[in-house]
């Protein structure tokens, strides 16, 4: 769909009017720096396709990090009426890919490159990285995996990973109700049962960061953030478990669409009525993967804490390591917006509730919960909060920077010199740059422009900015 189809609809906001089989309009948020990038892929076409689905609520949203995905674009939000449809492709392959931020009391300047290197090496000793890797915790067997699928992070807290108080700092308290392993295939079960406590590959990472600046002092203080502080960000999801569930249900929902007479605008938006057996089965399976991912990040956080103790020789509580918040990126869940109950699909999008919103955790009711927005591995990450104006995006904000180069294109175009220049002094765990070049900063949009797009129109507010010191990535 050509860029010229977009109509300016306010500052940093463009409307894609209904046409053809679209039931509602779509809205895209982009500033003048980002808008030209919209012509480079099929993300606008994918938004228009989502706007064709039964029960979709106006508008379908494209956030500033939008780029082409499978089904709904990454950086997309689709709310659906209770009598509408549910779509696996509008949630994504990596169900509940998400981000967790940990704070410490440690000044980043006190950790020289030798200590940082020891930390990332010790973390990698504890947390397996790369595609297909199995977890190292011998005590996590099928019984815990099955408990996790239905109870989420609480199941691994009960097994000794973290504290019950951590659950207050996780979206949905670390559990999306309704998970049922009976809706999960044997192949998905087998892929997931050994992968708790693993990072994966692709854009997943563990990053040691320094807070470079705080903006909203009251919110930063409540979140425990201050300039010069060492923080840790964890980005991973439901691993092969969620990927297999999405693969399975994309096929099943395509068949269900034919059964219920739903005309699909694309295979990637395979769907079924929410209240159908097929739709309910997908929701139950998806909830299992959501819960797996919350538990996975809980285990990895505990391993990071233990690695810090190994290197510093101090127990975790003495270094002030604590969970700030954990947010999901790829999820569908029931929420109340504009006085109505909708099933909100977020794909590469982060929830950002405003101050006073009743769905905030009690500890963050006055500020709104932290919305965590990582950049690429060589650029800044942000902590934001939503405002009342975020109601127009179903309280959703961008989940990261968003790609401008596909992985294949990045591998072909980015040279060793360009990669080294972009990374500067940042440490990374790979021995050869080719292992990470598809994740190079130049493969992504400018995080500063992406964040500014919604800040400038008052949908979000900056709380803190963090710069990377050392990053752990896994090989694909």
Image (tube, rainbow, N blue to C red):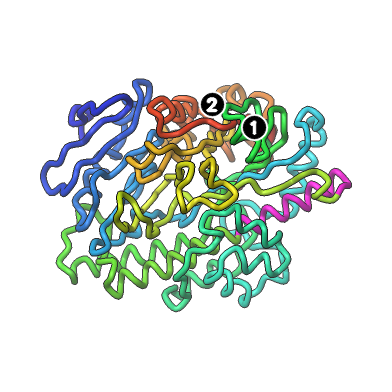
Q: Chief secondary structure of the magenta span? A: helix
Position of 109 with respect to 156 (left or right) is: right
Which percent across, then down, holds residue 426?
67, 29
Tell whether position 29 is magenta: no
Q: Which residues are magenta?
A: 296-314
In the displayed structure, would residue 329 be above or below residue 227? below
Q: Is residue 121 above or below residue 300?
A: above
Q: In x, y percent, where is residue 35?
A: 32, 26
Query: What residue does disc 2 label?
Result: 415
- Report the front residue among 388 and 60: 388
How packed mark 1 is, by other alpha carbons closer than 10 Å (few <14, some 14-19, many 20 or more), is many
| Residue 309 locus on image (x, y percent) | 83, 49
Picture residue at 71% right of the left edge, 48% below the top: 322
Q: Which residue is mark 1?
A: 468
Q: Residue furthest left?
A: 20
- Is 460 situated above or below 348? above
């Amino acid at each position: 769909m050509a860029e010229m189809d977009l109509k300016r609809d306010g500052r940093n906001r463009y409307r894609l009017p209904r046409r053809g089989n679209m039931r509602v309009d779509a809205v895209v948020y982009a500033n003048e720096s980002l808008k030209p990038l919209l012509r480079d892929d099929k993300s606008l076409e994918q938004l228009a396709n989502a706007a064709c689905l039964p029960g979709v609520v106006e508008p379908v949203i494209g956030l500033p990090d939008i780029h082409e995905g499978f089904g709904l674009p990454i950086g997309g939000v689709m709310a659906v009426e209770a009598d509408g449809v549910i779509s696996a492709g509008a949630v994504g392959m990596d169900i509940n890919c998400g981000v967790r931020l940990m704070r410490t009391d440690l000044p980043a300047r006190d950790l020289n490159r030798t200590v940082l290197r020891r930390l990332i090496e010790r973390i990698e000793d504890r947390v397996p990285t790369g595609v297909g890797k199995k977890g190292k915790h011998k005590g996590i067997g099928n019984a815990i995996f099955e408990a996790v699928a239905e109870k989420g992070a609480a199941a691994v807290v009960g097994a000794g990973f973290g504290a019950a108080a951590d659950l207050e700092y996780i979206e949905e308290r670390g559990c999306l109700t309704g998970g049922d392993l009976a809706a999960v295939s044997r192949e998905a079960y087998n892929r997931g049962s050994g992968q708790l406590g693993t990072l994966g590959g692709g854009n997943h990472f563990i990053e040691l960061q320094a807070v470079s600046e705080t903006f909203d002092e009251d919110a930063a203080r409540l979140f425990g953030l201050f300039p010069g502080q060492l923080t840790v960000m964890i980005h991973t999801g439901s691993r092969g478990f969620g990927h297999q569930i999405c693969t399975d249900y994309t096929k099943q929902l395509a068949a269900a669409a034919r059964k219920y007479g739903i005309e699909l605008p694309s295979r990637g938006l395979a769907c079924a009525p929410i209240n159908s057996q097929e739709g309910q089965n997908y929701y139950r399976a998806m909830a299992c993967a959501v819960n797996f991912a919350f538990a996975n990040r809980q285990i990895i956080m505990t391993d990071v804490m233990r690695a810090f103790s190994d290197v510093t020789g101090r127990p975790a509580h003495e270094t002030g390591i604590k969970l700030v918040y954990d947010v999901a990126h790829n999820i569908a869940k029931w929420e109340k917006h504009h006085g109505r109950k909708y099933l909100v699909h977020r794909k590469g999008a982060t929830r950002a509730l405003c101050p006073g919103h009743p769905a905030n955790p009690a500890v963050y009711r006055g500020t709104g919960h932290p919305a965590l927005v990582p950049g690429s591995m060589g650029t800044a990450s942000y902590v934001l909060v939503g405002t009342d104006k975020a109601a127009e995006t179903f309280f959703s904000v961008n989940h990261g920077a968003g790609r401008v180069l596909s992985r294949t294109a990045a591998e072909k175009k980015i040279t060793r010199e360009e990669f080294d220049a972009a990374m500067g002094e940042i440490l990374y765990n790979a021995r050869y740059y080719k292992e990470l070049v598809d994740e190079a900063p130049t493969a992504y949009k400018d995080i500063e422009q992406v964040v500014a797009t919604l800040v400038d129109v008052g949908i979000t507010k900056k709380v803190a900015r963090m710069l990377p010191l050392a990053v752990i990535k896994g090989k694909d």
